[in-house]
Image (spheres, rainbow, N blue to C red):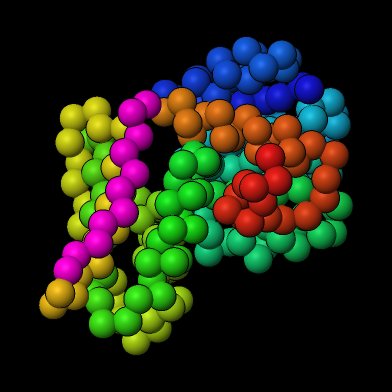
Amino acid sequence: MNLLVLGKGKTGSLVAEIARSRGHQVWALDEIDNPHACALTPELVRNVDAFIDFTMPEAALENMRAILGAGGRIVVGTTGWYAHLEEMRALATTHKSALLFGTNFSIGVMRLFKMAAELAKLDGYSFQITETHHTTKLDAPSGTAITLRQIIEAAHPDSKIEITSHRIGDAKGEHVVTATSAADTLELRHNAHSREGFAIGAVRAAEWVSGKSGVWEFREIFDQL
């Protein structure tokens, strides 16, 4: 496959490295190489099987508009743009393009989401979420923690789940869901040892979305990989 990675930060660079190790032809563009998505011409989009975006919210929106508007396929690991999801969905439908997005592309985290949904079925418990990331992570709480809160609040619509965020050193990412009752405490924990799990999931997502049309959240399709 021909893959183009948008973003040359720590995660984007690792995504490119893993994609090459899986036998793909890989190019990468940073925001300085692609201001306002100017490099994403229709001709370029036609020659790329899938794009993988790990940039910033505004840049990701511009990239999606260019790629989806030209009939391309894109995997988006960037968060913070979801208020525009319906706009992106309409673009994908109109141009028969494809968007696969997620707050986290780690298969381990996908399992965490499923276990959190089971844990959320408990009655008589209060829930709390704690997340820890590196000091350069700009958003707080993390997109993964927000997804966990949505999962639990779907089962307890009258509750407001508290998220506590910590930013420490070069922490790769830890998420803890705690359920507490008068009788006991249950805890779900995912601790990332490196960014490799996220990067592998993103590359596998790009392999899956190639040739498809539609819009999906990663946790809807990860078990098809």
Which residue occupies the foreground of this view, 36 or 123? Answer: 123
Which residue occupies the foreground of this view, 91 or 171? Answer: 171
- Please identify the dominant SS of the magenta region: strand
| Residue lying at 25% horizontally and 76% vertically, measured from the top left | 125
Figure quadrant of residue 133: top left
Would residue 18 be counted in the magenta stretch?
A: no
| Residue lying at 29% horizontally and 77% vertically, measured from the top left | 160
Residue 18 visible within the image: yes
Relative to residue 105, is residue 220 drawn left or right?
right
Task: Name the image quarter holding the N terminus.
Answer: top right
- Which segment is the magenta one? 184-194
Q: Residue furthest front?
A: 183
Percent position (x, y) of residue 41?
77, 32
Q: Residue furthest bottom?
A: 158
| Residue lying at 58% horizontally and 53% vertically, measured from the top left | 219
Would residue 188 be counted in the magenta stretch?
A: yes
Percent position (x, y) of residue 94?
84, 59
